[in-house]
Image (cartoon, grey):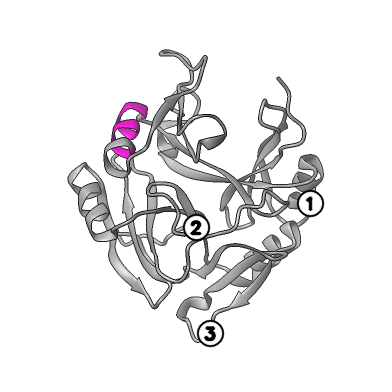
């Protein structure tokens, strides 16, 4: 069954140095990469055990709308029922088009855009590929959140463009670090965080993905051994022990041990 409209359904890890990044991520998470020849750009499917995690894509030589190289990053896709209608609606509500709706063979259709706060977001209309698996096991994605410099604009955009059910987090009041989820409680699919009070403006707005690990401290140490950087943490939270990590090419992501929750 296709994923509900407006919920995370897929991710692509776009890299510029295939050898360096593939070595880092496969050794850190135990991923395997299945080359999808004859697909161009060294596109591979990422698996963690039997779970389908996303795609691994060579972005070398690709540029953004301004002609600058596209940095290595984890790109998140939202499921949409009708990608042409969703893309047009997003542009009408202040989004900026990057890649118009396009076919990915029989797998489905995709599009890329920038939201009004400057964050990149991808859209996916499922064909034969519905999306990633989310068993919650080590190496698989478990949470997705937008870190935005303009919280009010982001909330309005994702609500109106993709039907987000905006539920403010208890205790996250005006003047504090505001946070809302798409849906309530265990039914929440993603979050929107007001990052303007603690992230420099020049960092911009961006979506980030959390991957489960069995031991956050050990995984952070392993990331360093493999040439990555621990940007923040590890530290405890009500959701688990977590850290922000960057690959040797600078692609940032979160790691979290959800078994270690602190009230």
- Identify the residue under disc 2: 10
- Identify the residue under disc 3: 37
Q: Where on the picture, by quarter, is residue 93?
A: top left
Instruction: Identify the residue at horizontal 47%, vertical 81% (top origin).
Output: 39
Q: Which mark is residue 237?
A: none
Dot 3 or dot 1: first in sequence order is 3
Q: Nearer the viewer, residue 171 or 130?
A: 130
Quick one: which residue is furthest to the bottom in this view?
Answer: 38
Query: What percent of the width, then of the height, locates residue 145?
Result: 49, 39
Query: What percent of the width, then of the height, locates residue 207?
Result: 46, 44
Q: Establish if 32 lies above or below 159.
A: below
Q: Which of 27 and 4 is in front in this view?
A: 4
Q: Do the residues labelled 2 and 1 touch (CB within 8 Å)?
A: no
Q: Residue 222 carries which label?
A: 1
Q: Alpha carbon of mark 2 to alpha carbon of mark 3: how far?
A: 20 Å
Instruction: Identify the residue at horizontal 52%, vertical 36% (top origin).
Output: 187
């Amino acid at each position: 069954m296709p994923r509900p409209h407006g919920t995370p359904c897929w991710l692509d890890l776009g890299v510029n140095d295939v050898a360096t990044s593939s070595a880092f991520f496969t050794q850190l998470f135990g991923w395997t990469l299945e080359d999808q020849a004859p697909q161009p750009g060294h596109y591979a499917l990422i698996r963690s055990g039997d779970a389908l995690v996303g795609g691994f894509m060579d972005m070398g030589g690709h540029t953004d709308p301004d002609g600058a190289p596209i940095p290595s990053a984890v790109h998140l896709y939202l499921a949409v029922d009708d990608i042409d209608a969703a893309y047009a609606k997003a542009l009408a509500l202040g989004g900026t088009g990057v890649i118009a709706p396009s076919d990915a063979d029989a797998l489905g259709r995709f599009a890329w855009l920038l939201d009004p706060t400057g964050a990149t977001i991808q859209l996916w209309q499922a064909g034969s590929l519905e999306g990633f698996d989310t068993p919650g096991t080590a190496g698989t994605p478990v949470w997705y959140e937008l870190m935005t410099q303009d919280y009010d604009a982001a909330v309005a955009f994702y609500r109106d463009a993709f039907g987000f059910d905006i539920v403010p987090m208890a205790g996250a009041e005006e003047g504090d670090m505001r946070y809302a989820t798409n849906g309530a409680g265990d039914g929440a699919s993603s979050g929107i965080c007001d990052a303007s009070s603690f992230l420099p403006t020049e960092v911009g707005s961006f979506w980030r993905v959390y991957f489960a690990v069995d031991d956050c401290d050990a995984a952070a140490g392993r990331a360093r051994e493999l040439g990555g950087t621990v940007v923040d943490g590890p530290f405890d939270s009500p959701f688990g022990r977590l850290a922000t990590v960057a690959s040797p090419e600078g692609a940032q992501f979160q790691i979290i041990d959800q078994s270690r929750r602190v009230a």
